[in-house]
Structure formats: structure tokens, C-alpha cells
Amino acid sequence: MRHPENHPPSTARALAARFLDGLLPPTCLLCGASADSHGLCRPCRTDLPRLAGGCRQCALPGPPPGRLCGACLRRPPGFRSAAAVLAYTYPVDRLVWQFKFRRQLAAGHLLAGELATGLAERITWRPDALVPVPLHFVRRAKRGFNQSELLAWRLGSVLEMPVDCGLLRRARATSAQSGLDLRSRRRNLRGAFRCGGAAGRRIALVDDVLTTGTTLNECARTLLKAGAVEVAAWVVARVPAPWQPRI
């Protein structure tokens, strides 16, 4: 039986160490003013679009706490619950972009800190492992890292939860999900993931952004088929529905 890892694998150890050390710049990542220990100035940090409540299963803003949105009532996702701490609007979208595509680890460290702080205040159960959404090795090599892994390591360090980066893997390369409609997203990811031994385990998937939930849903279904008894989704940011105001 595989056991969750307590430390990053050697190939990612140096990058993970830099990320966990959290060497933040002295100036705000957004406006350039003097920053606090979180990497933002106080006004910019105060203005972050934080989420409270929302659909208990997909974290969509709007429904009262504990209720389900219409989409989850009609077609429940594979994960039992989702938690998101920020709305994917400005400036969160900019910070995510800086982290993923400009390799600004300081932006990722800030987002991971927001995720850890927000989850510490609301989670009611502890998973057996945090499992980051995997990247295909080609995309990972191109990007240089998997942002979800770094988020999971930071989250595990703060919340004292084990991380298992090897439980779920991407079996084939897929097209980028951005720009695809919901049906195309589902078709694009069908059978894209493989899972080792998850029997009897409770898993929290970790990712940066929840848009339609297609990726997390496919990951959750793969884990459940492999014997996991419960899967939740923990993400930094949730994309609002098209009809909702941009916070």
C-alpha cells in the first residue's frame, strides 16, 4: 500500500523548498507599495475578493451556506464538497497568471497562504491525504513545475496534513480546457487520469482554480473508482457564473 509523502520528491525538492520558505519581495505584488509579510500592501490584501458560503458541493458563489446550486442539484459532481477562498476576478486572476505562467513563486506563496488560512477556519474533516491535480509530464516540463503540487505542499505544511503526489497521474496529454464549452471539456478529459491504490481513503484534491469543475470531477471519479470513500475539492479561487457580478 502506498503511503502519503511527508516531503517533496527529490526532483522537486529545491523548488518546493523555495516555495515553502516564502521569500516574498519587499514591495506589493500588485501596486508596488511597501508590502507586509504576506506579499501585498494592506489595502491590496484587504481588497482581495474573499468568498464566504456558496454552494456546498461546487463552491459557486450565491446559494446560502449549506445549500446546493441548480447545477449540482441536476448533475452532482464526483466530489462531495468544494471549498474556495477567493473569487477568480481581479486581482486574483492576475496573481494566478503570474504564478503559473511567469513563475513568480511569491504570487503562488501568497495564494497558498490565503488558501491555508481560509480552510483552517472552515474545514470540518481531515483527509487521509492532499492530492494535487496532476499535469501531463510534457506540460509540466514546459511550465517547469506543477502549481497544484506547490499549493498542496504549502497547505500540507500549514495544516499538518500528508501530501500524496503519486496517487493520481495524468495518463495522456489533453488540449487546454480554456475556450472549450462544457461538453467539449468533459470529452477532452474522459479517461485522462489513472489512480493507484486509493481503497478506503479520504482524499482532498488541491488545485488553483475551479471553473466548470470538469477537471476536478474527472479526478474525483477516477479516485472513487479506485476505491476512495470520499473526495473533496480544495481550491484557491472559484470562477463566478457568467451572470454573476464580477466582485
Image: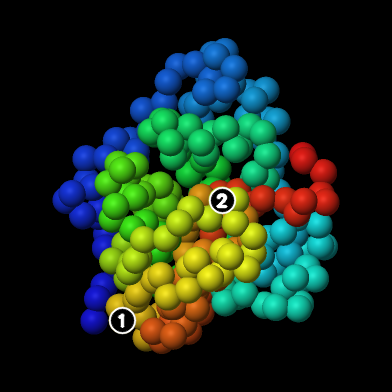
Q: Nearer the viewer, residue 161 or 177?
A: 177
- Specify the amino acid type for callout 1: Gly
Which residue, given by chain and number where applicable, does mark 2 sit on? 178
Image quadrant containing the N terminus = bottom left
Image location of residue 170, percent across then percent down? 35, 65
| SS for callout 2 | loop
| SS for callout 1 | loop
From where the camera sits, is residue 163 visible? no
- Distance from Cα at disc 1 to Cα at disc 2: 31 Å
Where 37 sits versus 55, above or below?
A: above
Looking at marks 1 and 2 on the same chain, the residue that comes earlier in the sequence is marked by 2
Q: Residues within 10 Å of mark 1 (few under 14, many from 20)?
A: some
User: Which residue is at 78% across, 68% downward?
Assistant: 69
Image location of residue 37, percent across then percent down? 48, 26
Say if mark 1 contacts mark 2, CB within 8 Å: no
**Residue 57 placement: quadrant:** bottom right
User: Which residue is at 39% across, 84% downward?
Assistant: 226
From where the camera sits, is residue 240 visible? yes
User: Which residue is at 37% across, 56% downward?
Assistant: 135
Q: Residues within 10 Å of mark 2 (few under 14, many from 20)?
A: few
Where 6 sits versus 70, above or below?
A: above
Q: Nearer the viewer, mark 1 or mark 2?
A: 2
Which residue, given by chain and number where applicable, does mark 1 sit on? 197
User: Which residue is at 40% across, 47% downward?
Assistant: 147
Q: For this view, does 101 lie left or right of residue 87?
A: left
Q: For this view, does 215 lie left or right of residue 192?
A: right
Q: For this view, does 68 lie left or right of residue 199?
A: right
Image location of residue 96, percent across then percent down? 52, 39
- Specify the amino acid type for callout 2: Ser
